[in-house]
Amino acid sequence: MKRLYSVRMRAERGRAHISGAEGIFEENDIGRTVLAYVGRALRHSKGAPDTLKLKVELIRRPPAFISALPVFTLKTRGPADARKKAAGLLARAGVSGRAVKKAFGILSTGGMRGAALIDSEGGGRLEPDKTRGVRASMLGISKGAMRRLTAALSQKNLDHPRVKDALVLASKVAAGPGIAAELCISDDPDYTTGYVAIPALGYIRLPHIKKRGGLEGGRVFFMTKAVAAAHLIRYLEETPVMVGKISEIGDIITLHGLEAPHNHHKPGGKKILHKKD
Ligand code: WAQ
Ligand code: MG
């Protein structure tokens, strides 16, 4: 097995977070990855960073391989409609109205580098550092799965690094112990599509969830209290996980199109596939 490295980039201006990116790569892909990350950070719509940090780190344990979530796009009429649909999806995942309200409050403030971790029932914050949040790290996609993902997304006009990065992140998060759902709104002023990811349903894109130019955004991971937060955080930050298989890349749908549950992640610890493609 080839040696694998985690490559991470973080760009800041003063103490403000501009952008971050990361993945797991083979040694001979590190150079071009670093170049792409640097280019992305320097041309960011949130403005030029004054500090750019790169970290390249050998992965010391073999990654677990998972399937990507299936991808769907909901038809939305604007921010209010998109948020209402997000709330409806989260309710289906067992997230309480209180927790949803808390999440939208956090996302409308913005400015975090990581994700808020919220108790899906009570709505309380569960992460130790509430300014930073928790980062999902040590994640990537195999070359074969990346090729198939690019081809499948291209057919739906969705082939963009942003979509791929978000899908890989959401797939690792969804496979985590205790995760009920994730809600994401980009903090980039010119990117207005967000998503809700639910382990048994998929990665559901929500266009127009924010107004163009808005500085709000962020991520919220909803978890059940049956699992210790520290256990989930260790998985999110430290366990190397790679997407080795892709799932359906679906069309634009209405909420009714989501009725049939997708047996993507089976409960009971059967989420991790052990076969590398
Ligand atoms: N772990 C935890 N939280 C993160 C991470 C991470 N690795 N990376 C970013 N975040 C949080 C952080 O608070 C950012 O401010 C926020 O998410 C938004 O990050 O299908 O572009 O990179 O069309 O701006 C999703 C829709 C786009 C893509 C998401 O997020 C699609 C996006 P951004
Ligand atoms: Mg951003």
Image (tube, rainbow, N blue to C red):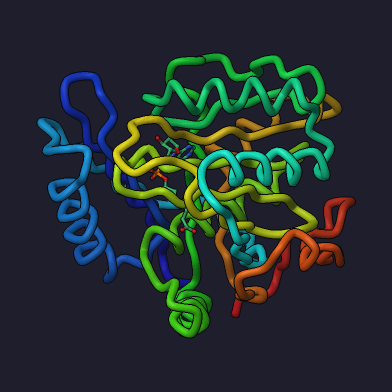
Q: Quadrant of residue 30?
A: bottom left
Q: Against 6, is 132 above or below?
A: above
- Picture quarter with the C terminus: bottom right
Q: Is residue 148 left or right of residue 183?
A: left
Q: Determine which quarter of the picture holds residue 88.
A: top right
The spot of residue 57 in percent (x, y) is 35, 47
| Residue located farthest toward the right when viewing the structure as drawn | 268
Q: Position of residue 160 (x, y in %)?
A: 37, 67
Identity of the residue drawn at 17% across and 59% down: 35
Task: Work out which residue is located at the far front of the displayed protein and give it.
Answer: 77
Lateral position of residue 206 relative to residue 267, left or right: left
- Please tell me how many numbered marks the rendered image carries: 0
Q: From the top left corner, tell me how far across and down residue 115 is, in percent.
A: 52, 31
Tell me which image quadrant ligand 2 sits in. Answer: top left
Camera-nearest residue between 248 and 60: 248
Q: Is residue 40 visible?
A: yes
Q: Residue at x 70, y 59 (%)?
A: 202
Residue 120 vs residue 217, the one in the foreground? 217
Task: Identify the residue at horizontal 17%, vertical 27% (top origin).
Answer: 13
Left or right of 124 in this view: 138: left
- For the question of whether residue 177 can be seen, the reply is no
Residue at screen point 59% across, 46% down? 82
Q: Is residue 152 left or right of residue 197?
A: left
Q: From the viewer's perspective, is residue 245 above or below residue 96?
A: below
Q: Position of residue 222 (x, y in %)?
A: 69, 33
